[in-house]
Amino acid sequence: MTPNRRQRLSPITRRRLQVFRRHRRAYWSLWLFGLLFAFSLAAELVANDKPIVMEYQGEWYIPMLVDYPETEFGGFLPTTADYRDPFVHEQIERHGWMLWPPVPFSYQTLDRDVQGPVPSPPGARHWLGTDDQGRDVFARVLYGFRLSVTFALALTVGSILLGVLIGGAQGYYGGKIDLFGQRLIEIWSGLPVLFLLIILASLVEPNIWWLLGIMLLFSWLGLVDIVRAEFLRARNLEYVKAARAMGLPSRLIMRRHVLPNAMVATLTFIPFLFTGAITTLTALDFLGFGLPPGSPSLGELVAQGKNNLQAPWLGITAFLSLSVMLSLLVFIGEGLRDAFDPRHIVTSTTTARPPLAATTHAQESQP
Amino acid sequence: MSETPLFELRRFSVHFGEAQAVSELDLHVDHGETVAIVGESGSGKSVSVLGALGLLPPGSQVTGTRTFAGRDLDRLSRREWNELRGGSIGFVFQEPMTSLNPLHTIGKQLRETLRLHQGLRGNVATRRARELLTQVELPRVDELMAAWPHQLSGGQRQRVMIAMAIANEPQLLIADEPTTALDVTVQRQVLALLDELRQRLGMGLLLISHDLNLVRRHADRVVVMQQGEQVESGPAQTLFETPQAAYTRQLIDAVPSGRPRPLPPQSELLLSASDFSVTFKRAKPLLRPRPPAFVAVEPLSLELRRGETLGVVGESGSGKSTLASALIRLLPSSGEIHFADQRLDQLGGEALRRQRRALQIVFQDPYGSLSPRLSVADIISEGLRFHHPELAPPEVAGRVAEALHDVDLPADCGHRYPHEFSGGQRQRIAIARALILKPRLLILDEPTSALDRTVQKQLIELLRDVQAKHDLTYLFISHDLAVVRAMAHRILVLKDGKVMEQGDCETLLRSPQTTYTRALIEASSLT
């Protein structure tokens, strides 16, 4: 099974994996980032204002997934039960049991029973304290991390699709398409992005989809140049010419022969797109033009930290979570860049071949 | 001749980690003598010399004794090394395109060398630089001093490199494949120049080459290397006349030989082009009229009969490859192209793509023409799978095996990747990729130029067999007349996009009509 799969990976891919694994910092960063992201994906199980499962009068309930009206548990209102409400809480405890997540607050939960003024400092009840509305900072960071990463992920995927499509068309067909495309992009990229985002965000009711759409308008620009250059180069490679001589249509040639070349540059660019997306989102939230109020956002936390200098845990938490996230991404990016660099020498063990021979054989067109 | 040799290596070995690149080489060069190291690519020729002069990257170890003019090279300090290299020992490398700095003028680069090693400045340096350029027989020296490297041809650049190498009156000149990247006619001139300089300046010349023809004519003594080992050494004449080692004999015999099979008398016309030309538009400068288009191939007519091979010969830049690419409609052209019973020049889109099956091409560079990401079976079957989507995978695999068999490669190499193969094997893969589509015309664009002589010979034989087996028509492009003679029925000689002459191979080679053709024939020293 394993040898079979290894066979299917091309030697280049295998070599890249090897280099990436050797790059210890990048390798560990990838693992750590993956774990953090997986952890944040399960945020509802970790920090929630609803129990995960409960039993009430001999019946099972899953409040995490299903909204039950308060009347179900002996309350008076037909609205969704508030499990933190002392009355409901007591009712359920008397007729059954509840399994709470380790942090019994969601990102929007206002803790009314907090001791002292808000923002309250870290303690046993709130691991990272509360913000100035009495919301649990840990829960907000956890959900905020998830939102940032998924947002960046969506934006990156979108930018890659757009950037590869537009850059590829320009590079492969060249000529007038390229000429006018490039001029258009030059003008487009001359626009002050942040201001435009702010203006657009104040024209519409900002929600996550609007923000994604608006940012997508600009984030693909950086990729176009790289992809275009790769396509320009690759269309003159001999194996691409050979494919043309075989009578393959352009779309097949692009997909099978040219795109893989461009993907190298694109993949190395991904971490930068990713960090860029996170920073822009954070900046917009910080300025108050980003996600709608109440959403878990790291930018808003930064703003809170700035407004509440007397509560340093806000600023410190925001700083640490952002810097850890961005550093991990940069480390992964470094590893990716090395893995895709054909000149990067795999250290000692396997392929110590004289560099002279390597240069005379000018290995792969060199991506 | 002095008692101690000028440059000597004894039991000299080079290692890269575990791998041994050169083992136990014995070599010496005397004053005024030309010694050649001969071998195929990867035999350790260059590595041994670079290693001896401490020019290999870190990670390599050299062992054995090496002396230059009686000094032990192992004991030199860094400063002494710097004085030696470029001072008493001059270098000329293979790539004239990359060994000059493109950002400085020729004059500046020459003066730089003079200043570093001899401390010459100002007018003195300029005068000496001019003298050197005259010495390497370059014309219009004053213009050259102010010229940039890109304005010079390959041959001129190589002469400038030689001028720089002899600037400090070295005792030993090392020329590493000095003419490999040059056109045949230029090769001779550069070697003649090296010979003359050697005699005049009394230098020792260490010539590294894969080209036996050239070595035979210029070297006093020869060392033959194979895979890092010294196979044989001795005076050039005896070595060539009575080679001792089997490998040496194999190298000497590796001259393209044989003739193409004669054509059947009534062979029908397969491809014909009339009034065929290729032009490239030049960019229009702002506010000025567009300059006239660049004519890459001037109007010409040609015919190819079924089973025939037409050799297209010319130096680099003569438009050979452009002609070939345009004939199979990879480049725009004007004029009529008839292929079988169709007007190829009027086809477009889908119809042209369908027709491409019958017109295949094999490129020069065996390293660039195969996608490094696909397995050999994928590479070979790609066109087949597109043109015949009805074939089931086992049938495709069968056809791939058949194609591999045609080019004498084992059938089990399909799941391997191109980088696992040598240059000659890769070229076979490229031919298999073309053959699987059952083409009628195969264009071979310098298919053997990047290969060693012995491999070249095998490939030529293979191509002739394949032609007979599949009744193929070839358009064979090459700068090497010896190869063309072994392949072609007829020859077309191109120079600067113009047809110099065209005709039957033997007749043309025996009695060339133009001086250009005569120079080409002379330069390739046909036996």
Image (tube, rainbow, N blue to C red):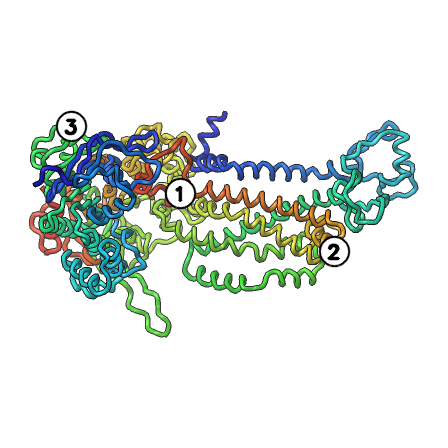
Question: The residue marked by circle 2 belongs to what chain?
Answer: A
Q: Residue at x 66, y 56 (%)?
A: A284
Q: Is residue B195 above or below residue B274?
A: above
Within 10 angstroms of label 2, few (less than 14), some, or many (20 or more) residues? few
Q: Mark 2 or 1 closer to N-term?
A: 2
Residue B367 picture quarter: top left
B29 on left or right of A165:
left
Q: Residue at x 12, y 48 (%)?
A: B198
Q: Mark 1 and mark 2 in contact (Cβ < 8 Å)? A: no
Q: Residue furthest bottom?
A: B287
Q: Amino acid at mark 1?
A: Arg
Q: Is residue A225 visible?
A: yes
Q: Amino acid at mark 3?
A: Ala
Asked whether the residues under marks 3 and 1 belong to the same chain, the reply is: no
B413 on left or right of B23:
right
B132 on left or right of B62:
left
Q: Is residue B268 visible?
A: no
In front of the other: label 3 or label 1? 1
Q: Which residue is mark 2?
A: A307
Within 10 angstroms of label 1, few (less than 14), some, or many (20 or more) residues? few
Asked whether the residues under marks 2 and 1 belong to the same chain, the reply is: yes
Disc 3 to disc 1, C-alpha distance: 38 Å
Disc 2 to disc 1, C-alpha distance: 49 Å
In front of the other: label 3 or label 2? 2
Q: Secondary structure at mark 3?
A: helix
Q: Which residue is mark 1?
A: A343
In front of the other: label 2 or label 1? 2
Q: Amino acid at mark 2?
A: Asn
Q: Secondary structure at mark 2?
A: helix
Q: Which residue is mark 3?
A: B246
* Residue B340 percent coordinates (x, y): 27, 48
* Residue B125 percent coordinates (x, y): 21, 61
